[in-house]
Amino acid sequence: MFGKILNYEVSENKVLVNYEKIQSTITLINESVVNFFVPFHREERNSKAVENVLNSEVKFEVKFDSKVLNIKTNVLSINIYDDFKVDIYNSKGEILCRDYRGERDPFRRLGANSTLAAEEGHKLEGHEEYKIYVSKVMENDMYFYGLGERTGSLNKKGYHYRNWNTDDPTPHGETYAQLYKSIPFLITLKDEEACGIFFDNHFESHFDMGKENSNYYYFGAVDGNLDYYFMYGPTIKEVVNEYTNLTGKTPLPQLWTLGYQQCRWSYAPQERTMEIAKAFREKDIPCDTIYLDIDYMDGFRVFTWDNKKFGNPKEFLEQLKEMGFKVVTIIDPGVKVDKGYKIYDEGLKEGHFATDKDGIVYKNWVWPGDSVFPDFMNSKTREWWAGNQKIMMDLGVSGIWNDMNEPASFNGPLPDDVVFNNDGTLVTHKEIHNVYGHMMDKATYEGIKRATNKRPFIVTRACYAGTQKYATVWTGDNQSTWEHLRMSLPMLMNLGLSGMAFCGTDVGGFGHDCTPELLSRWVQVGAFTPLFRNHSTIGSREQEPWAFDKTTEDINRKYIKLRYKLIPYLYDMMYKCEETGEPIIRPLLFNYQNDKKTYEINDEFNFGDNILVSPVVEQGARHKLVYLPEGDNWIDYWTGEEYKGGQYIIKEAPLDICPIFIKSLSIIPVGKEQNYVGENNDDILTLNIYLGKENGESTYTHILDDGESFDYKNGKLNKYIINCKLKEELRIELKENIGYSKNYNKIKIILNNLEHTKKVFFNNKEIEVKENQFIVEL
Ligand code: MIG
């Protein structure tokens, strides 16, 4: 494909390598991130994920000795050979990533007669021919993570996945190669060194982590350019940071979006929605958001309302607002073919719909019946779609739920050759399928931002790499089964490692009937998922927090209230995430990369730096085996018991207990008890400090702003930097950095496990602590 290296040229931070048959470009993004590009499909790069790569100046040297072209930065040494084989070393000369030299060699698969299965006519999955194909040497002790929303275990070794956004309503199993999202980003971990590979190609692509043959792992695509980034950690934290520097960080959301959310297909007519809203307030269960699924629309026509079911949406939404509820409405991409319907007429007239190869508007069948598909590749169409968001926002809708944007269609999939207009370049469905939802989200984001000037809240099902810039993600149609509760943990952890920090699953499960016990355990996980939304399908057993018995309702209330306590902590994490890309729900290995025992823990996670959650995910289980990672000490949230890290313990876990541990010396802000975010304004900053047996020091930054606008970006933000040092005596120091007009007037500090200190000082003044707490005026 390439042939021999002829020569090379250096231009700024690029090295152009001329091969006998084609030119490749190696771009140094920085000292530890490098891009490999070969224009097999198009000369120009057409990334939908990477919008602004910062081209900082990178120091590097290039040497060529007719066999090896070596590019060296302070951090990496990259050897490039004939046929574009690449080996990458760290500065110590240790190999990080080596191209595999052999041919593809799939494991033998035998059919009924012990002859090759393929010869017996069996279809073998994952044995495709790829136009683009890169394979790397797989070593025994390698671990794989990332790839977005995937079924199966946290460590992806031994799996094969396909990137082709797919709406598959059957119960997702571990063998599923594809779901709604395509995030071609893989993290490898070996000898405590983490690297990332981001294959920026939105054609159908595949990642195989040794399923085909355990000597190599590969990525490949049916078409497109070879365009991939290699990034070196050595920590996973750095890899995720680099990846999100390229594709974008999850931005700080509005505060209310972190509250509890209730959904159902469907809450209609409006009386039913009202009943649900009232029940939350009557039953003293906090809730911020109610969703309207497809039945609020007039015959599933997007941007319309069914006025029989919802007489006056504006008034109705106003009423809910007074009760403290936000409403999020679903929007599908499919536009009903219907003369006289404004959106259809306008779109048709202005050429906003995808066409077949002869230029005739393409139709398929979705909820509204015969439907056409907006061409989100076209910036004019995005502009139009963005403008339509105003219709919903002006009525008082607070967020948009983009569903079916794979795009899903009922009358067979969209053919490969459906045509879209990528601002002047005609592209086919085959090329843009995986970015269709992504571009719809981009349009939605722009529209809501313009209409409201607030941080847009969009929930999306389909994604490509980088969708986190625009939208929150949920994992689509799961089922009310224990298996799906278990599976949601590695799924959310890998989504987080893939840049999608604001994520969640349908709490209680979407399809099938939930049970009291399952909902009780699921809400215990939901309380810690960034998007905390209970949702269920039409015709299934009711699944609201009170839909079962008193015990289940009490457990729901307990964990939803716990969530509201944690909102300030979660918000602080989200703020940090916008800087660093750090996920909220994270596998233990993210913070404890030196502790190998964390590498394959599927059923536990860290909620930020300070909290560890080990939920019960088995029916009937009333205890849990918990691994506490090495390097920190852990305090049982419920009992205050202390444990040394680096050990397995068995925790009793009656139905109302989810094992939760706080890292010792943590500082955690506590949210006020309230029915919805903003019901009571916090004028006291409450902090929980957890003392431990061992001395030490920790720092925490808490933020306060208006919780909805973009003003925080212009300094209208308060930062409270709290430092606590334990050494016989406890010294707490607070530094304030005030930019926002409102401020707390008091600070209340609750000291847990107070017996570990003799004296307490706050900003160098000794404090008298009564009943383990004290209040200081600010
Ligand atoms: O074809 O709008 O995943 O959450 O309730 C089903 C109805 C369409 C799929 C979504 C689900 C939603 C449902 N939708």
Image (cartoon, rainbow, N blue to C red):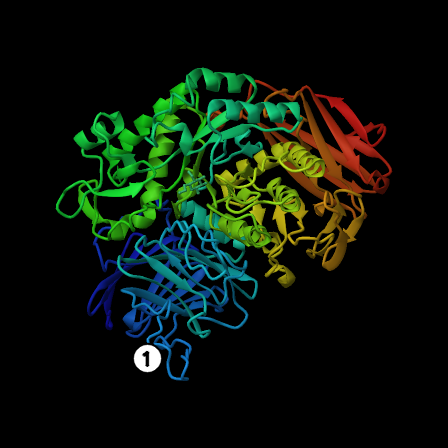
Along the line of sight, which residue is nearer the eye, 501 or 651?
A: 651
Mark 1 residue type? Glu
Residue 213 appears left or right of 133: right
Residue 443 visible within the image: yes
Query: Going by the picture, which residue comes out furthest to the left?
Result: 358
Q: Position of residue 550 (x, y in %)?
A: 71, 35
Residue under the image location 54 percent in, 35 percent down: 575
Q: Mark 1 points at which residue?
A: 119
Query: Going by the picture, which residue comes out furthest to the bottom?
Result: 114
Q: Which secondary structure, mark 1?
A: loop
Q: Is residue 105 above or below residue 694?
A: below
Quadrant of the rendered structure where residue 28 is? bottom left
Q: Is residue 182 above or below residue 131?
A: above
Image-quarter location of ligand 1: top left
- Mark 1, residues whose alpha carbon is within 10 Å: few (<14), some, or many (≥20)? few
Q: Where is residue 648 in the image (x, y as percent from the top left)?
A: 73, 59
Ligand 1 is within 8 Å of the C-beta of the residue at disc 1: no
Q: Is residue 599 above or below residue 478?
A: below
Residue under the image location 84 percent in, 42 percent down: 756
Q: Position of residue 775 (x, y in %)?
A: 77, 24
